[in-house]
Image (cartoon, helix red, strand yellow):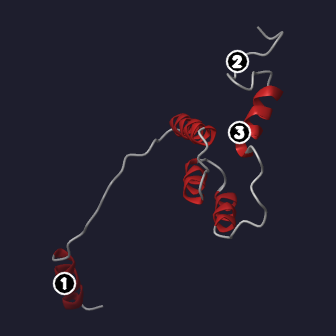
Amino acid sequence: MADEDIFKMLTNMGNTKFDLAMKQAAASPTERQAAYERAVQLVTLMQQSGRPIGPQTFAALVEMSDMPSRLEQGLRADMAQPPTMPPEAGGAGQVMNSIQQANGGHSDSGGPGPGNV
């Protein structure tokens, strides 16, 4: 490339206007994990109030998680497809209760279960 062409290209780039938005993101794994856990708590509260979790919210949770990128890409592709089965009664709320009970906590408060005081 000739020097004149490079100079013209740089001159044209100087006249280009950019519209740039920057956002501060959590940097450390601990900060990202805390933000993800807060988001999951908020989504759980939404579900408990009777609001279904839509594909955009689920996509946001997938994006916030620190899962391997290949799994994230697979989940995104799956979310683009229409559901093949009806939603389960109770949905994720029952799953969260089962996890808390398996860990020895109450399903309503997450506190220690009987005998684990």
- Which of the two discs, 1 and 3, labels the residue nearer the N terminus? 1
Nearer the observer: mark 1 or 3; the answer is 3
- Image quadrant assignment for residue 4: bottom left
Tell me what residue is drawn at x 60 percent, y 47 percent.
Answer: 65
- Dot 2: within a 10 Å radius of its alpha carbon, few (fewer than 14), some, or many (20 or more) residues? some
Query: Front-most of 69 and 74?
Result: 74
Name the spot of residue 100 as percent of width and height, x first: 75, 28
Name the spot of residue 105 as percent of width and height, x first: 76, 21
- Image quadrant assignment for residue 46: top right
Tell me what residue is drawn at x 19 percent, y 84 percent.
Answer: 7
Determine whether the residue tagged by mark 2 lies in a helix, strand or loop: loop
Report which residue position mark 1 lands on: 7
Report which residue position mark 3 lands on: 93
Report which residue position mark 2 lands on: 111
- Dot 1: within a 10 Å radius of its alpha carbon, few (fewer than 14), some, or many (20 or more) residues? few
Name the spot of residue 41 as percent of width and height, x first: 58, 35
Label 2 sits on what residue type?
A: Gly
Query: Front-most of 52 and 3?
Result: 52
**Label pair 2/1, CB-CB below 8 angstroms:** no
- Which of the two discs, 2 and 1, labels the residue nearer the N terminus? 1
Tell me what residue is drawn at x 55 percent, y 58 percent.
Answer: 56
Depicted 16 relative to depicted 98: above or below: below
Depicted 40 relative to depicted 75: above or below: above
Label 3 sits on what residue type?
A: Gly
